[in-house]
Amino acid sequence: MNQPYPKIRIRNLSKSFGSNYVLRNINMDVMKGTSFVIIGGSGSGKSVLLRCILGLMAPDSGTIEIDGKNIFELSYSEQAEKLQEMGMLFQNSALFDSLPIWENVAFSLLNGHRKNQPRANRAQARKRANRVLKLVGLDANNIEDLYPNELSGGMQKRVGLARAIASKPEIIFFDEPTTGLDPIMGAIIDNLIVDCVKKLGSTTIAITHDMASAQRIGDQVAMLYKGELIWQGEADKLMYSDNPYVHQFTHGLYEGPIKMEIKV
Amino acid sequence: MYQMKRPWIWVAMLGRMVLNGIKETGTLALFAIRGFINIFYPPFYWRIFWGSLLDIGYLSLPVVALTALFSGGVIALQSYTGMSQYHVNSAIANIVVLAVTRELGPVLAGLMVAGRVGAAMAAEIGTMQVTNQIDALKTLSTNPIKYLVTPRLLAATFALPFLVLIADILGVLGGFTVSVIKLEFSPEGYIAATLNAVKPIDITIGLVKAAVFGFLIALMGCYHGYRSRGGAQGVGAATTSAVVAASILLLVFDYLLTDIFFAK
Ligand SMILES: Nc1ncnc2c1ncn2[C@@H]1O[C@H](COP(=O)(O)OP(=O)(O)OP(=O)(O)O)[C@@H](O)[C@H]1O
Ligand SMILES: [Mg+2]
């Protein structure tokens, strides 16, 4: 069988903080132009996994290949080039609080290292920021000169999303894109993520706690439990999985093999 | 763990301290070099540079001016009470201008700026570190050292000599005011004595010292901010370390530079 080589290929990835083994032997493949969703309980290591793929955190062992190249063997400038093709929405948005909204969104156009691309001037960048802000459902004309701390949490999240997609990256990571949004806005954002995949041809990895959202945006879904990917499959099979862990998690059941460590 | 006999524990602890010290120095040196050589690789972030220059050079003026004014005055007063028995009043102008241009100008301005600017830099960069903004910079293909550290290092290196020049002038003015108004010297005599005593080389060396101090202050602010861990507490600790380290380094380098330039 002549399968195309995955865009992102992770093998035996492990990461621990002291005696806290957060990721154990993770293997996963993400195909080009598809959307991969990671679900899992709070503290199961989802954010850490994304940070490792982005190269923000060094794993203890294992390999991460992007376009067939192990990112830990790249030279400094090659790594910078790879990062240029990636965008990330952080769980806490991580907006630059000393810059106005529009400069946040246009940041990589204004400041980023962009090989073979001239840097945008401020007027162009502002226009682009305005367009992307409208795309994420924000009232661009009224907020683009405000500062991040003048926005609500959900609005900040959408600004973070706008910043992640503004440079049309090839790979986009979303850490809980719809958490803190109202259901309708959540659906709009889900649509936007699907559009990124369909129209821009981006490859995306998203973390979510919302099963409806996982099914809407995901082609593939994987569940992380105690540092291992215990289930992987197509998004439309997610709710019908016979894996007891997945079943309990996706249906939000109290009874099941997953025992929350709560001491009363 | 292997139990060591008492005397050896001290040796081991001493060894560990020395090793940590060496490691720390190495990390700091590497950080400084990375901050510095990025000047030669485009892009250079002019906005950050001008912003810091304004912050350090212009907004520190009141603090530095008041410090210099009163220090010049107090030197005049002290040397008068100390020397009135010898009837060598003309020496006061001499002492004031030498003390101010050689030592007090650079050191006091440096210490004031360390408290004001070093702390602010550590707090700002530290907050960016603990809220993932520095990671966000990386994902927006911007080198955080080049974006945050390099312009600040350069701005402080340029701003401090300017501040010290102002401090020199105001320090002498402070001495002049006290001598003329309180000690009832003749203004012409004081000015003549000052002009007679002041040497361009003293001023120049003071300004060279100032440039070194400026670099050290910004380096400490950025370095400790960049290494912040944890939350608000970590940022607070980084701020304190930045100011303490900058002040101590400043006095050490003051001695070293004086030794190089004046002791012949
Ligand atoms: N920088 C760090 N230092 C030490 N431990 C960390 C660090 N980052 C994460 N951890 C630990 O790794 C584990 C997984 O954290 P992670 O942020 O990946 O969780 P998550 O799956 O994203 O959870 P959530 O859904 O709540 O965001 C946690 O136990 C956390 O304590
Ligand atoms: Mg998380």
Image (spheres, helix red, strand yellow):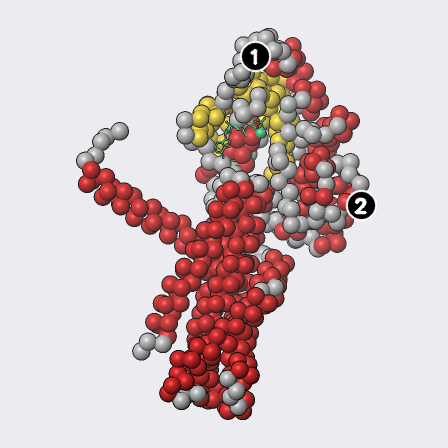
Alpha-carbon span between mark 1 and mark 2:
46 Å
- Do the residues bearing badges 1 and 2 touch, measured as CB atoms within 8 Å? no
Task: Give the chain letter at badge 1.
Answer: A
Which residue is located at x 38 percent, y 49 percent?
Answer: B24
Q: Nearer the viewer, residue B11 or A264?
A: A264
What x and y, as percent, mark residue B170?
Answer: 55, 76
SS of the residue under disc 2: helix
Amino acid type of the residue that numbered disc 1 sits on in the rendered structure: Tyr
Q: Quadrant of residue B152?
A: bottom right
**Residue under circle 1?**
A245
Is residue A254 shown to the viewer in this render? yes
Which residue is located at x 51 percent, y 88 percent?
Answer: B185
**Residue under circle 2?**
A142
- Answer few, some or many: residues within 10 Å of disc 1's Cα (few below 14, many 20 plus, some between 14 and 19): some
What x and y, as percent, mark residue B117?
Answer: 54, 58
Amino acid type of the residue that numbered disc 2 sits on in the rendered structure: Asn
Q: Which of A117 and B84 is in front in this view?
A: B84
